[in-house]
Image (cartoon, helix red, strand yellow):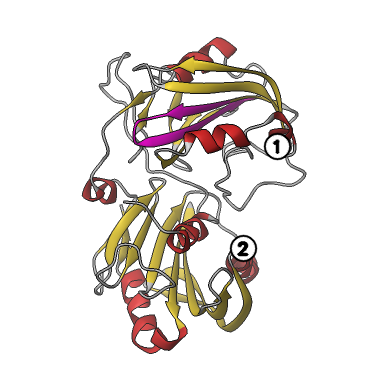
């Protein structure tokens, strides 16, 4: 299934503040030569003994800190365009100084491109969970000196993989990280049901919505209506995403929620109708209802953003509906969100 541009933009919108987190898979009982697949990912690895699947993003991180490997999955056929965009100058503008690049063959004989170099830390901590390939993925503090970085592009028959590895000096050896990357294994596509079952939350009341795509192992894209690829928001869209990272304090939550809403660059002319914190069933929440315009189409929409704050993270929902459908839909967004249970 290929998402049309409007749906793809909204999916990315839903991931902006999600931190690209992923529910962990246990490695207990796995043989040393058995690939370990991050939750819902098609790309598996044989990580060293001190690295485990991350709860914060799709990939692995060193338990003592200082090293991580993250995975981004894109549609098949994207390899050529991405390879062309990964010029030294483009990557340098994002802080990645390329020292070497070479065509490679990964496990299974798949074509790949491996770039090695150093990543300069951003001027301030990365907090928006950007899904771009070259900026630092979550997992390393921003106040570190330049770190060693690998960028692997994998050309699968029906999926394109971008694997990003980086480490602080001495955390792992170059050989360990390179071997882990080149040993990547591709498994067959997971069914949508399997991907939903692997999410770190479950939904007890769909309120007429249905899943159409799981994203990054921690997010779910849903719609209400018969089309899997609704254009111009002809059907309501709802995205749920869980982040496992330190939540903001109570005093910071309103500003945090507004920043999350405004971070979407595909919409403009935001007009907040309501922004409020509340407590329900012993849990702290924040909800925003706002009007906006979709930039590519000019469509007037209503957005609801609800954030559930937990001790170790937060669950964020984004519902988008055409302005003329708001009355029958906003309550359904809330009905779904209220039924979500963390696993």
| Residue pictured at 33% horizontal, 41% vertical | 40
Residue 99, given in percent of the width and then of the height, sits at 70, 19
* In the image, residue 153 lies in the stretch drawn in magenta: yes
| In the image: residue 99, left or right of residue 308 | right
Distance between the Cα atoms at labels 1 and 2? 21 Å
Pick whichever of labels 1 and 2 is earlier in the sequence. Answer: 1
- State left or right for residue 113 relative to residue 144: left
Q: Position of residue 56 (x, y in %)?
A: 48, 43
Residue 50 appears in the rendering: no
| Residue 3, image quadrant | bottom left
Residue 247 drawn at (x, y percent): 55, 56
Of residues 53 and 8, which is closer to you in this image? Answer: 8
Magenta: main secondary structure equals strand
Q: Is 114 or 209 nearer to us in this picture?
A: 114
Residue 234: x percent and y percent?
A: 38, 76
Mark 2: secondary structure: loop
- In this rendering, the answer to whether 40 lies above or below 197 is above
| Vertical arrangement, residue 150 with respect to residue 40, above or below | above
Residue in front for this viewpoint, 116 or 283: 116
Q: Give the residue displayed 27% in from the left and 38% down from the top.
A: 189
Q: Do the CB atoms of the residues marked 1 and 2 lie less than 8 Å apart?
A: no
Quarter of the image where one finds residue 337:
bottom left
- Give 287 or 280, whichever is nearer the viewer: 287
Q: Which residue is under mark 2?
A: 265
Give the extent of the magenta segment: 151-167
* Horizontal side, residue 118 vs residue 11: left or right: right
Q: Which residue is mark 1?
A: 90
How packed mark 1 is, by other alpha carbons closer than 10 Å (few <14, some 14-19, many 20 or more), is: few
* Disc sitting over residue 298 in the figure: none
């Amino acid at each position: 299934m290929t998402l049309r541009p409007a749906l793809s933009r909204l999916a990315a919108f839903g991931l902006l503040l999600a931190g690209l987190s992923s529910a962990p898979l246990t490695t207990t009982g796995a043989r040393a030569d058995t690939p370990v697949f991050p939750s819902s990912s098609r790309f598996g690895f044989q990580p060293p003994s001190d690295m485990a699947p991350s709860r914060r993003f799709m990939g692995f991180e060193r338990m003592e800190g200082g090293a991580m490997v993250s995975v981004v999955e894109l549609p098949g056929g994207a390899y050529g365009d991405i390879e062309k965009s990964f010029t030294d100058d483009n990557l340098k503008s994002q802080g990645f100084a390329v020292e070497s690049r070479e065509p490679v063959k990964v496990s299974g004989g798949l074509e790949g491109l491996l770039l090695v170099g150093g990543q300069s830390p951003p001027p301030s901590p990365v907090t928006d969970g950007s899904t771009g390939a070259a900026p630092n993925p979550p997992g390393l503090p921003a106040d570190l000196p330049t770190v060693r970085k690998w960028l692997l592009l994998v050309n699968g028959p029906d999926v394109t993989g971008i694997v990003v590895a980086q480490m602080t000096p001495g955390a792992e050896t170059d050989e360990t990280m390179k071997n882990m990357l080149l040993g990547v294994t591709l498994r067959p596509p997971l069914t949508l049901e399997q991907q939903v079952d692997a999410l770190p939350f479950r939904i007890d009341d769909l309120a007429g919505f249905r899943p159409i795509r799981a994203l990054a192992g921690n997010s779910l894209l849903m719609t209400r209506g018969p089309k899997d690829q609704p254009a111009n928001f002809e059907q309501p869209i709802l995205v749920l995403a869980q982040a496992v990272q330190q939540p903001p304090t109570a005093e910071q939550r309103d500003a945090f929620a507004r920043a999350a809403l405004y971070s979407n660059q595909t919409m403009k002319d935001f007009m907040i109708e309501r922004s409020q914190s509340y407590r329900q069933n012993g849990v702290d929440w924040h909800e925003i209802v706002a009007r906006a315009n979709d930039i590519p189409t000019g469509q007037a929409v209503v957005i609801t953003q609800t954030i559930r704050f937990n001790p170790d993270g937060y669950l964020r929902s984004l519902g988008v509906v055409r302005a003329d459908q708001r009355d029958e839909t906003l309550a359904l967004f809330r009905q779904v969100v209220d039924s979500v249970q963390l696993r």
